[in-house]
Amino acid sequence: MKRFVALVLSGSMFCAIAHSAVAQESIVESVAQGCEKELQSYCAKVTPGEGRVLACLYAHEDKLTGRCEFALYDAAAQLERAIAALTYLANECDDDLEKHCAKVAIGEGRLARCLLDNKANLSKRCATAIDETQLKVE
């Protein structure tokens, strides 16, 4: 259980880096619904942000219901898949990022937008990775 909560904590940082607002909202909503009872009972006075709510759940892990544990497990699995896709994209598109997006500031989906804007000029490896991961910018 500790591994799942730790992964969700680190994954929340990933979502901020990857700027996938839709994915982040879906994961947060899933945990909020699955852990509604625990959030109200143990974490209601915790100020949201910077992983504090998840840290609260971690501190009360011995009291979590199966539903909440599953929500955290599912969130961790979604984050693992997203991290794997991002790693794949970074590996396959490394040269293209250097060539087409070197002057683009990191964050808020700007690198993803740059790749999508330059898709016609990307290497086949990178274009395939974009298609396979269904890269989008919201």
Image: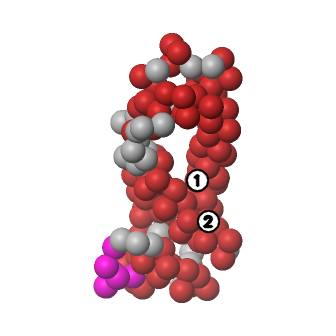
* Percent of width and height locating residue 13: 49, 62
**Residue 98 in view here:** yes
Left or right, 121 with respect to 81, comes to left
Q: Are marks 2 and 1 in contact (CB under 8 Å)?
A: yes
Specify the quadrant that holds the N terminus.
bottom right
Prevalent SS, magenta region: loop
- Above or below — where is 67 with respect to 17? below
Q: Residues within 10 Å of mark 2 (few under 14, many from 20)?
A: some
* Percent of width and height locating residue 136: 45, 31
Residue at screen point 47% across, 69% down: 35
Specify the quadrant that holds the C terminus.
top left
Residue at screen point 62% across, 36% down: 94
Query: Per the image, is 50 magenta?
Result: no
Which residue type does callout 1 highlight? Leu
* Percent of width and height locating residue 14: 52, 56
Q: Which numbered disc covers residue 39?
A: none
Residue at screen point 65% across, 44% down: 87
Which residue type does callout 2 highlight? Leu
* Percent of width and height locating residue 102: 48, 37
Left or right, 138 with respect to 111, comes to left
Comparing 113 with 102, the one in front is 102
Q: Which residue is mark 2?
A: 7
Comparing 74 with 81, the one in front is 81
For marks 2 and 1 on the same chain, the one whose residue lies earlier in the sequence: 2
Which residues are the magenta region? 43-48
Residue at screen point 40% across, 39% down: 104
Q: Which numbered disc covers residue 79?
A: 1
Q: Residues within 10 Å of mark 1 (few under 14, many from 20)?
A: many
